[in-house]
Image (cartoon, grey):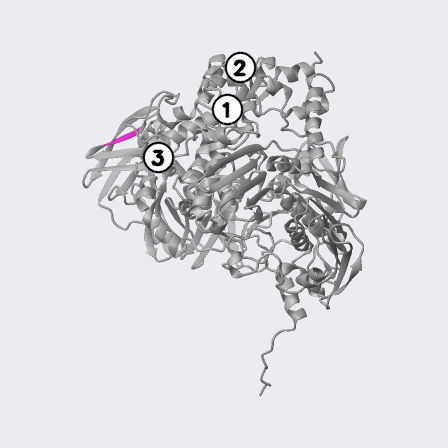
Amino acid sequence: MPPVAVIALLAADVANQIAAGEVVERPASVVKELVENALDAGAETVTVSIDGGGLARLAVTDDGAGMGPDDLAMAVVRHATSKIRSADDLIGVATYGFRGEALPSIGSVSRLRMVSRARGALEGAECLVEGGAPAVVKAAGCAVGTTVSVEDLFFNTPARRKFMRTPPTEGAACVETVVRMALSRPDVRFVIRRDGKVVREFLRHPDVAARVREVWPDETLADLRGARGAVRVTALLGAPERARTGASHLALYVNGRHVKDKVLMRAVAQAYGSTLDAGRYPVGAVFVQVPPEEVDVNVHPQKSEVRFQSQGQIFEAVMTVIRDSAANAPWTRAVTRPDAFWSERLPQGPALEARGAASTTADAERDASPGAAEPRPSPAPMVPLPERADPGALGVGRALTAFVTELPETEAPQDPWGRLKQAPYPPMPYAEVSPPRGGASRSSEPVRDEGPHAEAAPRGDSGLSASSTFSGLHYVGQVRKMYLVCEGEGGVVILDQHAAAERVTFERLRKSFAARSVAMQPLLVPERVELGADEVALLEEHSAALLRIGVELSTLGPTTVAVRAVPALLTRADPRRLVRDLVAELSRQGYDFSRAVDLVLATMACHGSLRGGEAVADDEARALLRALDTVDFAGHCPHGRPVVFSLRWGELERKVGR
Amino acid sequence: MEFVVNKREFVKALSRVQSVADKRSPMPILTNVLIRAEASGAVHFAATDLLLAVTGTMRADVKKAGSVALPARHIFDTVKALPEGEVTLTVEKNFQARIKGARRRFDLAGAPGEDFPSLPEVGNVPMMSLPAEDIAELIALTSFSMSTDDTRPHLAAALFETHRAMLRMVTTDGHRLSKAERSVSGVQTGSKLLIPAKAIHELRRLVDEARSEKREDGSPAMISLGAASSQGPVFFQRDGMTMSSKLVDAAFPSYEQVIPTSTDRSVRVSRQALLEALRAVSLVSADRTFGVKLSITPGRMVITSENPEIGAGMDEIDATLTGPDVVIGFNSKYVIDVLSSLSCDEVVLDLSGELDPGVVRPEGRTDYIGVIMPMRI
């Protein structure tokens, strides 16, 4: 008979090591905890040093409130925290950390050294913890604030150490972690050193937009803001053609906390509609503010997951704010180089003024954060430019201002709120396409004075319809049998003929698809699909709507449906995939069936359109320009590639040295 | 390694294998053709993409035995570009190959032949011999209804069944099904092989080559077929060439269940007339759905299609109807595929309701049927 096990409380160091397994996964998680503590201490500058991938040494220095000797000793005791006092405080947590697990956990698997001096205290104190041994505290001289250094991470847990990647990989993850946190805290200066060298530095800014642009200096990011009820959304996002596969360059924040939330990711992708391929996400950051009681952050020890009380509402808010204000985004219209691009390459002319303006802004920012190091010159693509401040100088008509410049002055980030709320809703695919009318128009040009398209046409304060832009261009000719060259008031405009034609065909197909009863192709062999019980219920609930778009399903069991017919347009698609996509669509709020059909329509549009390499008659080209005016997102083909490139007279003149 | 051979022989041998080499493979060795010369005078060629493998043999004046792997596209293109006549291939140190014809020559960087993956060998797999002509017909009658969707491997394949003296091929893409049979001698009982579409296309090449070669004794060209097990690989052989393929490891739909056993009505029409009418009328069918309507009354069949954006089309052909009138919609492409693969004068459409599967078969024959699901237009 085996000896009876006696139940006993775990020794504190064992419990800490177990907790460390959850909180301290790799150096980057240590960095996260330490930077959060620094921010919670009210730091204005946070310096992170990463040596040997963070495995050799990690240090985080802040100029925050600091701690006295007693606090230091207490800080490394498990579940000791200054941040909450009772369970009630968990609702509406305003600080990053609160579990009181981080420091003792880190201390149990490394050599932890904390040096701190509270503001107003005469001298600082030092606290050493090695492998979870009791803390040793002694007096030490230091500046106000706290430095926490972690050496030889996992020196006493070889199993964990073995799972670490190479120092460069771990180091990169640490930098990434700091960048993610820096994105949401423009009020704090961040300095990241790696193996002794400063690799990134972010200055203090009054607005989050400046910080986001500092992080992605090469991207043209649109500043999209709005509110739906109590949910406020601020998004800085790149153009669809710059989207990356996977969401690694899309940073999401809920109440300032970085999260990896699939619902929010989907909301962002959904807002871009057909211009994004499935699985691709734009570059940039989205900040969502919700009332604290609406969100539960205590789901995961690393707090990267959150739960919303009303997920659908948050999804809708994020999706609609981005979608609606994206109509005015710099990249929904012509693609132009940011002026910084030219100012870096062209030594003379207005470019110098542009640079001057940029450095003035930078100076002001530096003044605002005393003690900041000399800022590195950054391209600052979105700095307001002289041309934009005076569109008259360019000879650009108001309508074309909205068209050729990447950011009309009226939409400068300084005043985004009031205006963007009035931004018209661009039509949703399907949901808002005009209901079926008797016979579809025979004209190849969609009817313009009907339906939401016409309402969506006027954009911006200019009061001019954006639709006058393309047909207002003077068509000059075709080059390389690929591009249509036009003269506009503001400059030369070059269209990719295939992409432009594709965009027009796509819109036409989409309308005619929505306006007719859908041809259905029943299956010879019904396809069984295994789903969750809730998903089957969802499909049953919407079976009438599904039938209307050409999908016939029957329920075979609580978790099984059979696909009996598919839309004739989608005969080549895998019925199982189609149903899974439909479930995904249905489980979001609202039903628009956009993805599957859009994808097919986009493919069909691509095959059925004018191609590169075909000669275009003048009349055809002009008809294409007119047709483009009737299309939303006309600046991009359905696959998300830009249709238009424009070269402003100013750029051209600088190029030729006038 | 060194051998001398006539350029035409060399090009022919290479052309058979080079198309199988996987030119985009992440495994660089697979972009090569393996060439192995034996002292006996046999030169073997091989290429594979790991799903399919093709090997061939030619006779040459082998001066020195050895093996080398050379980039498929480049060896093929360069040998083709040599002048007519004798070609010498020499492999030197570091697997540098020199291909020389008259005064023109190319040097290609190769890899050791040992790096090439070992290919399945026929060994003692029992093979049966089938007329190439029959296999070619079966492929022509069924391959169009294989699915092109690689994510559904059980449909992107053809079922090859042997039963008593019967060879049967069945394909379906979920909307339509084709079943064709030929009675052949030399067939052993019961085997079912699910052959991937890619192998079927390669088999078609193999069969066409066999048929195009004149045989001195006038006997029909034959193809040997055998499978190591129901998991594969399956082998197809003809003179000096072997093709092997993995089999699809999935269940083919139980096709007998979807073939209607009895129908309410039967329509006999001229194959050519229906084919021409469908091709013409479907010109104005709705965007890429190719939907057409067949309205059948005693004596005639009216074919119509409509596209609100273009207009409408209509044709009428003679038909002999047994049973009540019917109006039924089809994807015209599916019907056209069947009609154009047949060669008979008249076809019979066996139909029931407008939502029930329809059958197309050659008049007076039972060795082929096409089942097509109607379209709801």
Look at the picture and state if A240 lies above or below A75. Answer: above
Viewer-side residue, A444 vs B97: A444
First in sequence, mark 2 or 1: give its number. 2
Look at the picture and state if A497 lies above or below B149. Answer: above
From which residue to which does the magenta span run? B301-305
Kindly report which numbered mark, 2 or 3, lies closer to the viewer in this rendering.
Answer: 2
Q: Which mark is residue B332?
A: 3
Q: Quadrant of residue A631?
A: top left
| Residues packed near mark 1 inside 10 Å, few (<14), some (14 to 19) or many (20 plus) | many
The residue beneath circle 1 is A500
The residue beneath circle 2 is A397
Cα gap from disc 2 to disc 1, whole angstroms: 23 Å
Q: In terms of secondary structure, where does tag 2 sit?
A: loop
Position in image of residue B218 (x %, y %): 50, 42
Position in image of residue B147 (x %, y %): 44, 44
Q: Which mark is residue B347?
A: none
Viewer-side residue, A477 vs A144: A144
Viewer-side residue, A262 vs A232: A232
Kindly report which numbered mark, 2 or 1, lies closer to the viewer in this rendering.
Answer: 2
Residue type (three-letter) at the residue carrying disc 1:
Ala
Position in image of residue A47 (x %, y %): 73, 47
| Residues packed near mark 3 inside 10 Å, few (<14), some (14 to 19) or many (20 plus) | many
**In the image, is A114 to the left or to the right of A636?**
right
Viewer-side residue, B257 vs A158: A158
Dot 3: chain letter: B
Residue type (three-letter) at the residue carrying disc 3:
Ser
